[in-house]
Image (cartoon, rainbow, N blue to C red):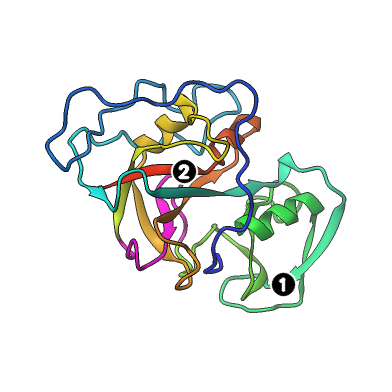
Amino acid sequence: MRPRRPRTVAALLAGGTLAAGCGTASGAPPEGMLSLAPPSAPAPAAEAGDRAAASPPAAPRAPVRPLGKRGAWRVTTYFTAVESYYKGRPQAVRGCPKLHCTRGGTPLGSYPADFLKVIQTEGSGRITAGPRKGRYLNWSHSVGWWLDTATRDSGARPLRPWGSAAADKDVLTRGRRFVVADCGRQENGRPVPAKVCAAFRRASWTVTDLFRPGYGGQHHADVYIGEETGPGFRRYYTTLLGATLGAA
């Protein structure tokens, strides 16, 4: 289960040449509503090694009501690491061999040190080699390391790629569904690449996890984008500043 804390890792921004932002939908929506016409950019998953946790569901076409002030949201992302993409020096891990155990001392195997470091930030990693292949190595401040059959939120519920989200309960309550109506900009001030924005706008998120009170920050949502799928995946591991959310 992921710790109830804010994301502490700096988002990795897409470098080099950036595409234009995702633009605006055509047609004027009713007063106080946001238009969510499908973006013109193709869905992620068109390129090999760039499957962005499978295509998110199609975006709703009907206008939606904005949540909070337009352009006021910060949307951060988290993902599940995949062992095969890491080549660090093997490091032994001890913890719990199953869920519902705390601070265990059972040997859980050895894994690349850089893989373990990412898990301690993101909360989970899928094992791809050895006798535990296919299982997940999870970590949280309150539990330590443990082996599992899924990557989970703080309530032990399996996370849904492009569907599960966390937020401060004073802003978005548990169970609240929302969509990204406008992507805003990247942390460096540049537009969000069109393909990246299209993926966020096509998804529908549900708040399944909550930050500790006061830690999430006003108008901050943290969304899960699934397992990494190759070099192209990192473009989706980003932060949207000045984004607009709508009720789903």
Q: Report whether 208 appears left or right of 26.
A: right
What's the distance in space between the residues labelled 1 and 2, CA to CA?
37 Å
Which amino acid, mark 2? Leu
Please report contact status of discs 1 and 2: CB closer than 8 Å, yes or no: no
Q: Which mark is residue 201?
A: none
* Magenta stretch in the rendered image: 158-175
Q: Quadrant of residue 171?
A: bottom left
Q: Quadrant of residue 122?
A: bottom right
Which residue corresponds to the image point at 63% horizontal and 79% vertical from the top-left? 102
Q: Which mark is residue 95?
A: 1
Where the N terminus falls, by quadrant? bottom right
Which residue corresponds to the image point at 54% horizontal and 62% vertical from the top-left? 6
Q: Main secondary structure of the magenta part?
A: loop
- Residue 77 screen position, x and y as percent: 52, 48
Mark 1, secondary structure of its residue = strand
Please give the residue where the numbered disc 2 appears in the rendered image: 241
Which amino acid, mark 1? Gly
Q: Residues within 10 Å of mark 1 (few under 14, many from 20)?
A: many
Which residue corresponds to the image point at 68% horizontal and 51% vertical from the top-left? 127
- Residue 222 screen position, x and y as percent: 47, 54
In magenta segment, residue 170: yes
Residue extending farthest right: 89
Q: Residues within 10 Å of mark 2 (few under 14, many from 20)?
A: many
